[in-house]
Image (cartoon, rainbow, N blue to C red):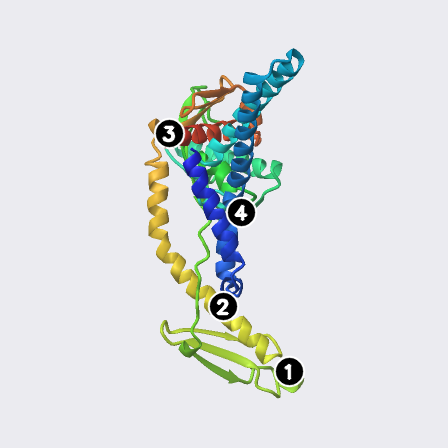
Amino acid sequence: MLDRLTSVEDRFEELNVLLSDPEVVNDYTQVQKYAKEQAVIREVVELARDFRRILEDLDGVKEMVHNESDAELLAMAKEEHASLEKERDEVEAGLKLALVPTDPNDDKNVIIEIRAGTGGEEAGLFASDLYRMYSRLAQRLNWKMEIINSNSTGIGGLKEITFQVNGEMAYSQLKHESGVHRVQRVPATESSGRIHTSAATVAVLPEAEEVDIEVNQEDLQIDIYHASGHGGQNVQKVATAVRITHTPSGLVTTCQDERSQFKNKEKALAVLRSRLLAAEIEKQQKEITAVRRSQVGSGDRSERVRTYNFPQGRVTDHRIGLTSYNLEQILDGDLMEFVEALVQEDQARKLENVGI
């Protein structure tokens, strides 16, 4: 582990040099890139320095214990040795966790898609319950939610809903919610009182990176003309309306809302960039679709990650074997017991995989 720490420390110092390089300082993109990388490894470097200091102190105390003849001083040395060993173990545990490879998407916002699966109308009602559960969780964590698209059923359920969640480390907290969620209960439409099993799929996707759109001025044809009006005082005496044509794509944007030609040009350019960005994001959708399919499977009941059993008031996550009998509270957004347990299990698995 010390070899790995040395390489991280060397990179940290290298980044310090780069961030003081005049050529880098004048390049905002490079500064952001190096500063972000340095921020990621800073914790490891600080822990590594503490770890080395503790090891040096331990060597000194061990020598004192070995050579000291005074009983009182020897007792003090042994006490300090035990304290340093405890501190070493704590710092080492922190280092192991900090050295675990992180998901580059962990700090991103998320897009969540919930779709009714097997179970007809009851599956739609359960999809609605899941949406409310995540809504209430977002409220508890002071996260912002925004519906992107939804398709409801006739009895208050949801065929599907897509929404965005903006919050600190949202993807790291919610990514393990992906999969098939199963419900066991007596449907409101069931007259005989029989328990039905239905399912809904949940896909948690990291918010797509903003694609860097560079618009070459040579590719733009900019036309200035008089804004249309209704006559009288509303007719602009100075040409301020702007039409921008992006030659490579053939896209055309216009703006005449502002009285300033400059502001109209900026707005038209913003629209053009947005349209070009939308075209690039559309290319990413095939990859996103592949991720979604790998996450949620077919929506069949047998592919479940979690079961919500109403008769017993029980929620069980089948991946980690965690069961809670607080079903009502969980559906009201009190989900952190499962979220934290899944994150811890993921970290433990990564530790095992990297052999630290």
Viewer-nearest of discs 3 and 2: 3
Seen at 37% across and 48% down, the residue is 288
Q: Quadrant of the C terminus?
A: top left
Q: Amino acid at mark 1?
A: Asn
Seen at 54% across and 37% down, the residue is 49
What residue is pinned by disc 1?
234
Q: Residues within 10 Å of mark 2 (few under 14, many from 20)?
A: some
> Which structural element holds mark 4?
helix
Q: Residue 216 at x, y = what percent?
A: 42, 74
Cα–Cα span, label 3 and label 4: 25 Å
Q: Nearer the viewer, residue 206 or 202?
A: 206
Q: Residues within 10 Å of mark 4 (few under 14, many from 20)?
A: few
What residue is pinned by disc 2?
271
Q: Amino acid at mark 2?
A: Val
Residue 355 numbered tag = 3
Cα–Cα span, label 3 and label 2: 50 Å
> Which structural element holds mark 2?
helix
Give the mark, 2 or 1, whose residue is nearer the N terminus.
Answer: 1
Cα–Cα span, label 4 and label 1: 54 Å
Q: Are marks 4 and 2 in contact (CB under 8 Å)?
A: no
Cα–Cα span, label 4 and label 2: 34 Å
Q: Nearer the viewer, residue 234 or 32?
A: 32
Give the mark, 4 or 2, whose residue is nearer the N terminus.
Answer: 4
Q: Residue 345 at x, y = what percent?
A: 44, 27
Give the mark, 3 or 4, whose residue is nearer the N terminus.
Answer: 4
- The image quarter containing residue 317 is top left
With 78 as the anchor, is 126 left or right in this view?
left
Q: Residue furthest top?
A: 71
What residue is pinned by disc 4?
39
